Amino acid sequence: MSQHDYVMALNIPLPTREELPEDLQKYFAKCDQKLGMLPNVLAAYSHDAEQLRTFSRFYNVLMFGASGLSELEREMIAVAVSSTNHCYYCQVAHGASVREYSADPKLGELMVMNYRAADLSPRQRAMLDFSVKVTTASYSINEADRQGLREVGFSDKDIWDIANVAGFYNMTNRVASATNMQPNPEYHSRHR
């Protein structure tokens, strides 16, 4: 099995780092420095520099930009959506992030298996229930759903952010599953 097979099942030539534009070489070096690895999703997107740039910019704004949602809450959304969609890559990768941000390995596992079994605040439960509804029945979301989020303290901007994070992971889950994208092995042992 080649290194490429550990990234995804499609036989799309992936450039070496030296073949990437300079800005992407620097971005990958920053990933190495901060994460100790290059996430396979970025390696997979590297075949198209503009897709990689767009994906990375949107991901970084959604997950780390200014928001009423904490980084942990955004990761919890990623895992609840990915669990609903049975996306192996994102359950593994973002389950590790939940373990990191919460400093609670058990919470990371509960989020992957069934967030409803976790001891969550009413705010977190409402956020995840809404995110799962975005995933399974977005057409049925109505004002009562949005009002339920307001009642546990979310602003309308927060609701926008919840919907965008959930929507982003619905897209990435489908791409990862359709291409059999594999999570980096390092994720399995992190923050346990």
Image (cartoon, rainbow, N blue to C red):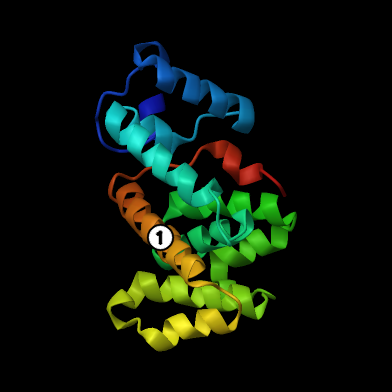
Give the amino acid at mark 1.
Asn
At x 61%, y 72%, the residue is: 124
Residue linked to disc 1? 164
Q: Which is more toward the observer, 3 or 142?
A: 142
Q: Which is more toward the observer, 160 or 189?
A: 160
- Quadrant of the image occupied by residue 107: bottom right
Question: What is the x, y in percent for residue 188?
Answer: 60, 45
Please identify the quadrant where the N terminus is shown: top left
Residue 19 seen in render: yes
- Left or right position of 149 against 152: left
Q: Which is more toward the observer, 10 or 71?
A: 71
In this rendering, is residue 131 above or below 30? Answer: below
- Quadrant of the image occupied by residue 57: top left
Question: What is the x, y in percent for residue 38?
Answer: 51, 29
Q: What secondary structure is marked by label 1?
A: helix
Total numbered circles: 1
Question: What is the x, y in percent for residue 104?
Answer: 74, 58
- Quadrant of the image occupied by residue 20: top left
At x 43%, y 72%, the residue is: 132
- Left or right position of 122 against 10: right
Question: What is the x, y in percent for residue 35?
Answer: 61, 33
Residue 1 seen in render: no
Residue at the top extreme of this rendering: 18
Q: Residues within 10 Å of mark 1 (few under 14, many from 20)?
A: some
Residue at the bottom extreme of this rendering: 144
In this rendering, is residue 71 above or below 52? Answer: below
